[in-house]
Image (cartoon, rainbow, N blue to C red):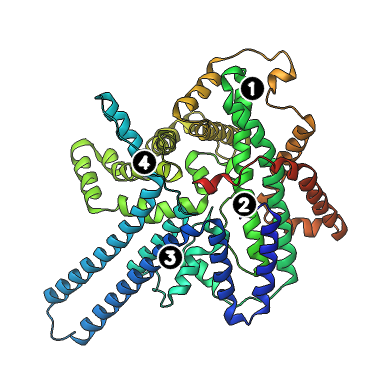
Amino acid sequence: MSILSVGFLLFALGLCLAYFLVPKRFQWWVLLAFSLAFYALGGLLSLPWLLLTACTVWAAARWIQRSAEAEKAFLAARRESLSKEERAARKARGKRARRRVLTLCVLLNIGVLCAFKYVHFLLAQADAVARLFGGEVHDSIRWLAPLGISFYTFQTIGYLCDVYWGKAKAEENPLKVLLFTSFFPQITQGPISAWGGLSAELFAPHSPSYENFSLGVQRLIWGFFKKMVVANLLAVYVQRTFADYGGYLGVAAFLGALCYAGQIYADFSGYMDIMCGLCQILGIRLTENFERPYFSKSVAEYWRRWHISLGAWFKNYVYYPLAMARWNQKLGKLARQRLGKTFGNYLPATVALVLVWLTTGLWHGASWGYIVWGGLNGLFIIFSMWMERPYTRWKKALRIREDAWLWRAFQVGRTFLLITFIKVLPEVGGLRDGLGLWKRILTEHSLPRSLGELLPFVDKYRDLAAVLFGVGLMLAVSLLQRRGSVRALLGRKLPYALRVLLYVALFFCILYFGVPAAVGQGGFLYAEF
């Protein structure tokens, strides 16, 4: 079901009515029914794989919980009779058993994810190698990845790890785990939520509220405006640039790359605004996924403010376990002894970051473009970490103040340009085309002789005006967000009639510009990851 269709609006209306008409103890049942219906409408054949993940994670989490509780009761009952060594041996056996169950469940679900997303890529690489020796590898497998598998797999693995580490209690009701897995507002593009935060929202009773309704509708309109007006109109420019970058001036190709940076932000954050707005009407708070990312002063900071839940997931469940792993700590200790204290201290974090960013690239897409994209992000972050002390000395020598507005502007501009160049690499059509776009931008320096040469991808200047208005409005909102909630600020500063007029204007912009722009455009970009 397309989020941008009238059918989805009717679906959301039916959800809101059913949610508040049933007794509160049944509200989560309504969420489960609508989530499964949404998922089935997106592809009925994908439903068994969703159920497999939910069932295996529920069963593994329950077994781990019961094993830990049984061990604790056993040791408590035999506190006096068991020696210290016997107690340690019993704990070690129990931990090994729980780790085996955790590992098997994670491998099963990661295996399903890899089978759907990466088999074609691996077979293509095997075929390339085989052709060097005169052979061939046939790829006869045609699998369509289940809707949202990248997101719900990571979310459920996070829940299972939290149970294993004792951070969360295993849920006894398998249907509640199924709702946590399939909750439709976040299944296709996130956020990737932790069990503790999302379960508290899903299973708590909620009453209808005019304030929630008003704020939710406002955010829905804002999300639809960002996606349908800004993202979809920019998508036309981006597609034309990527398809014919070799025929454009370098400056025109660069403007096309900037358009992609605007498109993907308006697209992804627009989806989040739509779903957060719908959930706010229901009284449910979703984890925020953006915090003015294009105002970041470094690549590391950018990833703390863009797709926040994905970064938090990798930090909690990949980076920290890898950085603190016994083998990695031993490697760091050996490096301190042989290569110096500084090198040894940074090495475990560096190893973990390399693995995290290569995995992040593969998570986004099975292609060399995404692998290089992830590697470049990791390279900039690792380089900044290693150069932190020299940077501090240089800034002190040059008398650069961190709070100086010119220095902050330089940092933000530098980071935005780096991120923009990295972003386009896997999206042009492949790694070779991505590098070709880079080459065109960096080596073609002809000056445009007309507006048509500067903006060859624009054929309707009316649409360009709408894009500039939308981007300017998004920029203004981002600047105002430094003071807190923009909607709360508007509520204090603007009369009610003027606020209504503002949202009515956005609504008519969606009808006039957004609806025609939606023709021929696909869905949301992050739904493909």
Residue plotted at (49% across, 27% down): 434
Amino acid type, label 3: Leu
Q: Which of 463/213 is in front?
A: 463
Residue 295 in view: no
- Residue 138: give x, y in percent of width and height: 33, 36
Answer with mark 4 or mark 2, whichever residue precedes in sequence: 4
Q: Which of 104/465 is in front?
A: 104
Answer with mark 3 or mark 2, whichever residue precedes in sequence: 3
Amino acid type, label 4: Ser
- Left or right of 168 in this view: 527: right
Answer with mark 4 or mark 3, whichever residue precedes in sequence: 3
Residue 77 location, quadrant: bottom left
- Residue 255: give x, y in percent of width and height: 63, 27
| Residue 496 drawn above or below residue 393 | below
| Residue 65 drawn above or below residue 432 | below
Residue plotted at (75% across, 70% down): 210
Quickly name the residue at label 1: 252
Q: Which mark is residue 51?
A: 3
Alpha-carbon span between mark 3 and mark 2: 25 Å
